[in-house]
Amino acid sequence: MVCFQILAAAIGAVAVVLVLRLWIVLRPQDVVPRESLNLLVVAGSGGHTTEILRLVGSLSSAYSPRHYVIADTDEMSSNKIKSFERNQANRDCNTMYPQYYIHQIPRSREVQQSWFSTVFTTLHSMWVSFPLILQVKPDLVLCNGPGTCIPICISALLLGILGVKKVIIVYVESICRVETLSLSGKILFHLSDHFIVQWPTLKEKYPKSVYLGRIV
Amino acid sequence: MKCLFVTVGTTSFDDLIACVSAHDSLQIIKSLGYNRLILQIGRGTVVPKPFSTESFTLDVYRYKESLKEDLQKADLVISHAGAGSCLETLEKGKPLVVVINEKLMNNHQLELARKLHKEGHLFYCTCRKIPHMKALRINNWLCFHFSTLPGLLQSMDLSTLKCYPPGQPEKFSAFLDKVVGLKNKH
């Protein structure tokens, strides 16, 4: 009985500490000046990858090295990324070799997969994502909506919660989302540092989001 | 040679492929002056048989590394409502008809098609055979639309479509440089 009470108190204390740490991590932080940035990009299937590569294509060479994370069943995205990086290297003659890496993680959820089984597949993705994030220790995570980004962003948050590193999470909602946020968007609206929308209707609904116009 | 290009991106959209390759649709397409129809069918299970006659050619394929060439030679593009397909087409200045896949959950693709249609950049419809007014509840919005693909192809006026201004990713990079503390290196 006493053991149970001690255990309950310990769990409670750990939960309180974690929530407090999460609150500290999510607070607006001071901007730290820097010369370069270790970037992690989550690429989803089809249009998600096209959109995110347009955004990455606009960034300077200071965003290097670039780590791309894709779902393990996504062959298309891998090819698109390689093609994109080849073109970037051709344009930027200073770079001898493209500074990028592609990592694969299990997909958290297939289209139309049941929500019940999604809990298990997401946990499986987390099991792989966290060691990856721990190894890469990105300065910035950039994503735009595929389910693949949830375990990655939660892992990035955990790095902050555990005091390892504060990772900046930037979420750009897909241009497809005019009136409503995606499921990933609804979750990450509360967990990201900067949440960007591309239509004024969404900015009105979510005043804390950032609206820069159409950026893809 | 007047060319019609149909694309479903990386998805499966059997209803669209079946609709556009059906006999009566092909008759309409021919009557509109097209002599080439290219179907990019993605993951679909409906695979029409390609053929070539003196006056008309039907090409069918699943994927290409880049759709640039087919988009370039198209006089009209019919596409699923995926953002990538829509934006690539609009940026090439090609007339675009977007077909909504009603089998997709919540059908969020309709939001973009409706917005771009409202701004005058494209036409959109479903591929139902019988034109009728249908009420759809999508994300708690009750919307009505009564365009079917064959009907729309016959009635639309492509000259009313407005040019699509491209997006501005440089605004994103300027914003990101600022918030991560990078000095502007452009």
Image: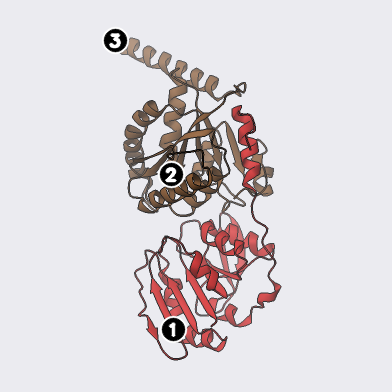
Q: Earlier in the sequence, mark 3 or mark 2?
A: 3
Q: Which residue is mark 3?
A: A3
Tell me: B89 left or right of A4: right
Of residue B64 and residue B158, the one placed in the foreground of this image is B64
Callout 3–callout 2 Cβ contact below 8 Å: no
Q: Callout 1: few (<14), some (14-19), or many (20+) C-alpha neighbours within 10 Å?
A: some
Labels 1 and 3 in the same subunit = no
Q: Quadrant of residue A27?
A: top right
Give residue A75's position: percent from left, percent from top. 35, 52
Q: Which residue is mark 2?
A: A147
Q: Secondary structure at mark 2?
A: loop
Give residue A57's position: percent from left, percent from top. 54, 45
Q: Using the numbered discs, state the Cα–Cα distance from disc 3 to disc 2 in whole angstroms.
A: 40 Å
Give residue B43's position: percent from left, percent from top. 37, 63
Give above or below for A145 relative to A168: below
Q: Chain of mark 2?
A: A
Of residue A29 and residue A203, the one placed in the foreground of this image is A29
Q: Residue reaching furthest top?
A: A2
